[in-house]
Image: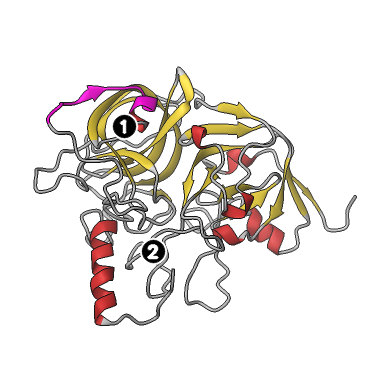
Amino acid sequence: MQLRKTLGAAALITAATMASMAGCSGRDDEDGNTPDSGTCVGTCANDAGTDAGTPDSGTPDSGTPDGGGGVVTLTVREARDLEEIREVILENVVVTGISRIDARNAAGVTADFWVADPANPKDGIFVQKFRDDPQNDYSPKAGDVVTIRGFVQTKSRFNDREGYRRVIKNNFDVRGSGPIVPMTITKVRDGEPLAPVQVSVASGFGNADGGTGRPNQDHLGARVHIVDSLTITNANPEAFKRLSAVPNDTVYYGFEVTGGVLVNNNTTFGFTQDGGTRRCDYRVQINNDAGTITFPQGIKGVWDTFTHAPCVDGGTSTFSCFNDAGVVPGTDNRWTTALYPDGCEDLEPVQITAPGAQ
C-alpha cells in the first residue's frame, strides 16, 4: 500500500472506482444538512460507506445473490457459512454489542451492532441497519431479542476497521439493477432485564501476534469475556496505527494487553458526546505516564475483524475520502482479529499503579 498526497488522472479513476465500492459518496453518506435531532454513540462521522463486498481476490465476497431460492430461516452459524449472498431470517437472536448508533436524522436510526444465537453464544454476526430499514426508529440495546430479515454478505476491503467482516444488512450493495430491499428488524423482547449472551475464555485466547495473525476465527462475531487478569502491554501497537500524511501521527485505534490481544477503543477513547467527562481513555493515561493499568477480572467485548483502510491521498478522514484497500499496519496481513468493548463497563474493574510503585 502506498499513501499519496496527490493523485494523477489514472489514480483518480481508480480511486473513484474504489469510492463506488466503498461508498465514499454513495447512498449511506449523509446529505450534509444539519442533523435534525437525537444523539450519536460510537464513531459519529458520516456513514462509512455502501460496502460493496469485494475481498482479496477481487471476486464477490459471498458468491452471487440468491438465484430465486427465496428467503430461508437459518441459525447464525448457517448464515455465516453461506457461500452465496442470500436473504435470510435470523429468529430470536440477542443483541450483544453496539458499535454505533446515530439517531440524528429524522428519517430513522442508523445502527451498527452485533447479535448472537442464545443457544450457541459463540455464533455471532455484525448487523448494519440503515436509517430507513424498518423499524426505522429501532435503537438497539444489549440484551434485546430481535428477529432480523436481511442479506448476508462480506464487507468490502475498502471499509475502514470493518473490511472483510461477515454482516447482515439490506441489499443495496448487491442488488445489481434490481430494487432495493430493506433489512427488517422486529424486536421480540426488550433488553433491559437481560444480560448479553457471551462466552468465557481463558489465557491464550486472542494472540494476534502484533497483527500478523488471525486468532480464534471460530469466535468471530461473538461476545467474549477473557477472564484472566490482563495488563496493558502496549498503548501504541503498530497494528492499530492510523496511516496518514500527518507527520508523527499520534492516532491509534486501541491498545494491546497481556497475551497479544488487540483491544479497539472506539467506544472508550476521548470525551463524552457532550464534550464533558473523559471516557476511560487508558491509552492517553499510559502515554501520560500513568504507570501500569491492569484489569484484574479480565475484559469483555465482541471478537471480530479489524483492518485499516486509509485515505489514498494520505488524509485522515476515512469517512469522506477515497479509501485504499484494508491492511493491518506494520504487517503484510490484510485483516486481523480484535476485541471491541461495548463501553467502559466492559473494562471494569481497573487497577492503576503509579510509576515506580510496588
Any magenta on residue 74? Answer: yes
Residue 320 lies, with reference to residue 112, above or below; the image says: below
Residue at the farthest left position: 178
Magenta part of the protein: which range?
68-78
Where does label 1 land, which residue? 82
Question: Which residue sits at x=55%, y=51%?
Answer: 265
Any magenta on residue 161? Answer: no
Where does label 2 land, which residue? 318
Residue at the farthest front position: 57
Quadrant of image for the N terminus: bottom left
Tell me the quarter of the picture where residue 93 sits.
Answer: top left
Residue 228 is at least partly visible in this image: yes
Measured as percent of width and height from the top left, residue 227 is found at 67, 31
Residue 185 is at least partly visible in this image: no
Question: Which residue sits at x=18%, y=34%?
Answer: 66
Q: Nearer the viewer, residue 137 or 275?
A: 137
